[in-house]
Image (cartoon, rainbow, N blue to C red):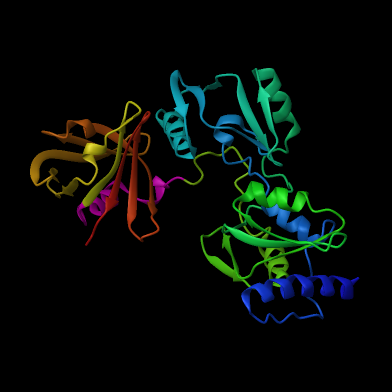
Amino acid sequence: MNRFVTYILSMIFLLSSCAKEEVINIDESDEPAIVATSKLADLIQRTSLNDGSKDNIIDRANCFNIQLPATVTVNGITLNVGSEDDFDTIEAIFEEFENDEDELEISFPVTIILSDYTQLLINNENELNSYIDSCNGENEIDDDIECLDFQYPVGASVFNTISEIVTDIIVADDEEMYDFIDELSENDVATFTFPITMILSDGSQRSIISLNQLETEIELVKDDCDEDDDFDFDDDDFDDTSITEQEFIDYLVSCPYIIDEVEINDQHLENLRGATLIFVADGTLSAELNNVTTNGTWSVSTDNGLRLSLTMDTLTEINNNWRLNKIETEDDGKDQVDLRIGIDELKLIKNCN
């Protein structure tokens, strides 16, 4: 069998080489192939399964997610959830008051997407609960490998041993990768166009140059991360117990900040983006937007978390007693300060330059 697979792979690479006028060396001793029943095919497909845990704040189910957009009512506030970014808004409403009872109602019908990307129309809560009950519970072992992802697109070639036809395809996303493996017949032998890139759970990347390395890499890291298959929605938030009120004050006065996003009453206020805020230790605040400077005041307090109170003479849209939701580092290395109050949000970028 190994010699046969090696022959088929050689044919694939030979045909590709003729088109590209390249010579590709194949290690005939141990280079595997992607065939329908192989361990490698199973690992690839498990890596590309639909991750149902991302929207647990809505459905509390790890084996499917609700297709967006969807409408939900959170503690009496109706929201149109258009993207995963809106999950933070739901969380902010939950966390606004410490001792209240949080409730979320889904407006039906909705469509759910199973781990194999099958879509099902759900007409009521009873139907939804029947699928929720079929999922594994919190942090139970499941088939989905979430600790690494393919960076798309990925090129692949499939050789059919009956027709002796080579088919080249481009795989654009996880769903297409799942289908690519699922549709391999017992007469198909496949491989990828290397190198490909895998993205680990910490954001780092690995360049993969062979199927052997791909299988080893998936095996190595498949259980090496917290897949977040739980209903602890704020476990990735900024831990305000690790920073005191004074430390937050010192953090704010250390550099200017740029307004990155303002959303008030479900409306994005693009006209405020790019305004520069300067927090002064005496509690005064200045803001510059379009070469116009306005003044105001600010203060920090502790009330169900750290709060930043802003009062501006103009730019009054940001006047509020904001709750610090989290501080995270963006891809460019700059800190983003995420402030929330109900469904409203204010995001500031720390700009020490």
Write down the quadrant of residue 306 in the picture. top left
| Total numbered badges shown on the rendered structure | 0
Spot occupied by residue 301 in the image (x, y as percentages of width and height): 27, 38
Left or right: 80 as drawn, with respect to 207 = left
- Above or below, 39 against 240 in this view is below
Left or right: 350 as drawn, with respect to 333 = left
Image point (59%, 37%), residue name: 231
Q: Is residue 238 magenta?
A: yes
Spot occupied by residue 79 in the image (x, y as percentages of width and height): 44, 24
Quadrant location, the C terminus: bottom left
- Above or below, 304 against 333 in this view is above
Image point (73%, 29%), residue name: 133
Quadrant location, the N terminus: bottom right
Write down the quadrant of residue 166 in the picture. bottom right
Between 202 and 176, the one nearer to me in the picture: 176
Between 99 and 34, the one nearer to me in the picture: 34
* Residue 101 visible at all: no
Mainly helix, strand or loop, the magenta region? Answer: helix
Spot occupied by residue 54 in the image (x, y as percentages of width and height): 57, 41
* Residue 174 visible at all: yes
Q: Which residues are magenta?
A: 237-256
Between 166 and 347, the one nearer to me in the picture: 166
Image point (37%, 38%), residue name: 305
Q: Is residue 40 magenta?
A: no
- Above or below, 150 against 312 in this view is below
- Above or below, 157 against 174 in this view is below
Residue lying at the far right of the rendered structure = 1
Image point (62%, 27%), residue name: 111
Spot occupied by residue 64 in the image (x, y as percentages of width and height): 66, 36
Left or right: 100 as drawn, with respect to 311 = right
Between 197 and 334, the one nearer to me in the picture: 197
Left or right: 296 as drawn, with respect to 145 = left
